[in-house]
Image (spheres, grey):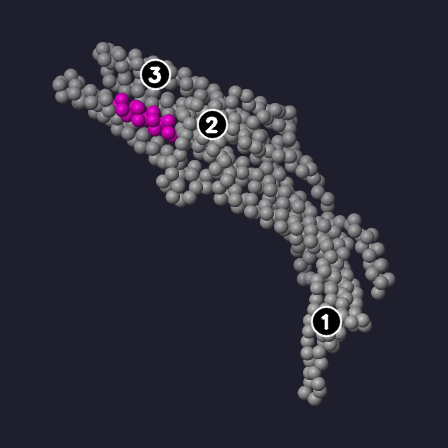
Amino acid sequence: MRKELTVLTVISLLFSGCLMGPNYKRPELSLPAGQEEDLGVFVSEKWWEMFNDPVLNALEEEALANNKDLTVAMAKVEEARAKLGLAYADQLPTLDATGYAQRTGIAAGHPWAQYNIGLTAAYQFDFWGRYRRLSEAARAELLSTESQKDTVRLTLTADVANYYFSYITLKEQVEISKRTLQSRKESVRIYLVRYKNGYSTELDLKRVEAEMAGVEASLAEFERQFALSQTALSMLLGRSPKEIIEGKLEGTPLQEVKVIPEVPSGIPADLLRRRPDVRAAEGMLIAANANIGAARAAYFPNIVLTASGGYASDQLGTLVAPGTSFWNAGAGLILPIFQGGKIKSQNRQAKAVYKQMLASYEKAAQNAYRDTYDALTNNQYYRKIVVANTSQVKALARSLDLAQKQQNAGLIDILDLLDVERNLLSAETSLAAARRNQLSALVAIAQALGGGWREAPEN
């Protein structure tokens, strides 16, 4: 028996380096020329601090601490770590303690007892690397799950920033509309007095009243969106239902949020390593590649060594006495001959999953470059839009001042004044929206570049 065990051990050592299936190689992609960029705050762990807004900083920390989607993602990482532990354990020997006591008898004889205590060991040789491939797949799935958590974190922090910017933008648009409405109400009051005293026509009065009603409608719409933005942001923060309904949010005035002047001008050369969604996709691709090898190993024999030893006696008091010890050892081999096509189907399934994961990885790479290019483009043009809208608001504000003086002097009628006021309201609300878009473009750059980036392990 010892000779047989020695032979099996030597065989296992000879085959210990054998692995079924292809070794992973990162797919070749047709990529644009990258640049060495100083990305600064865009890839820092707390990239949102570039806006220098203490309210936003506090909201981000609250979301990271309480958001339910992030909590689920973190639990999935722990689950993946446990799966890796299970996969590693399959490569190790097992050792179990055994023991039993029984009493047996027949009708014509005296009963007899038997007692047994001992240890049983078993080891399954991984000749063909099946368990090593499964362990490799589990490690890759852990990498993917950790990257998915990073994706959830990045998406969450970006959403918090965007919803916050929408919130303070809508707050400003509500204030603009309220100021304009107050001006419209005053105009209605003046024209009502003029109409009653015969200094203006009913047509002029109704025009002013119609403009006031239009502003009231716009104000109601901005207030509706403002209320919804509060609940949406509260949900991201992980607040309770009571806090969502009854809680209040603070906000820095939109004009005071810092817009950093320096932004990347090109796509970084290592973009694919920065993006957590790309890392997650590659992790699943590595796992699928390893599972091909694990499936292929099922075609080959499975060899298991077992050994046990202990004490056996018909008297409990002499169970561990000299002469009651025993041992046995054995080796088992299972070679699949007919499985009804099961193993072949498992191999086809593994290859099909690999094709799916390869397509998912390539799509993630495509999205990475598209998102980055779009974010850089949006940042460039939204800055120009803010400059143009700012000039428009200044010009219309001056036009309104001149129009009011001319209308008071009787040089222009009420329609000309209302046109200027209407255009100014539109320009002011558009400027607020443009500022929000400019801030959101910076958020998009951080998200596209993998804000909170950490080095991905080389494969």
Can residue 352 be seen at all in this image of the molecule?
A: no
Q: Residue at x 40, y 23 (%)?
A: 431
Question: In terms of depth relative to the viewer, which is nearer, 30 or 427?
Answer: 427
Q: What is the x, y in percent for residue 123? A: 75, 58
Most common SS among magenta residues: helix
Q: Residue furthest bottom?
A: 108
Whole-percent x, y for residue 52 in the image: 49, 26
Per the rendering, the mark at residue 182 is none
Say whether disc 1 or disc 3 marks the residue closer to the N-terminus: 1
Q: What residue is drawn where x is 67% and y is 47%? A: 137
In whole angstroms, how far apart are the C-alphas of marks 2 and 3? 29 Å
Q: Quadrant of the C terminus?
A: top right
Picture coordinates of residue 27, whole percent (x, y): 68, 38
In the picture of the structure, the residue carrying the numbered disc 3 is: 397
Count residues near mark 2 (Cα–Cα under 10 Å), then give few for <14, some for 14-19, many for 20+.
some
Residue 173: in magenta span: yes
In this figure, which residue is indicated by the disc labeled 2?
A: 53
Pair 2/3: label in front: 2
Which callout, 2 or 3, points at the residue further toward the start of the chain? 2
Residue flagged by tag 3: what amino acid is it? Ala
Mark 2 residue element? loop
| Residue 287 as seen in the image, left or right of residue 426 | right
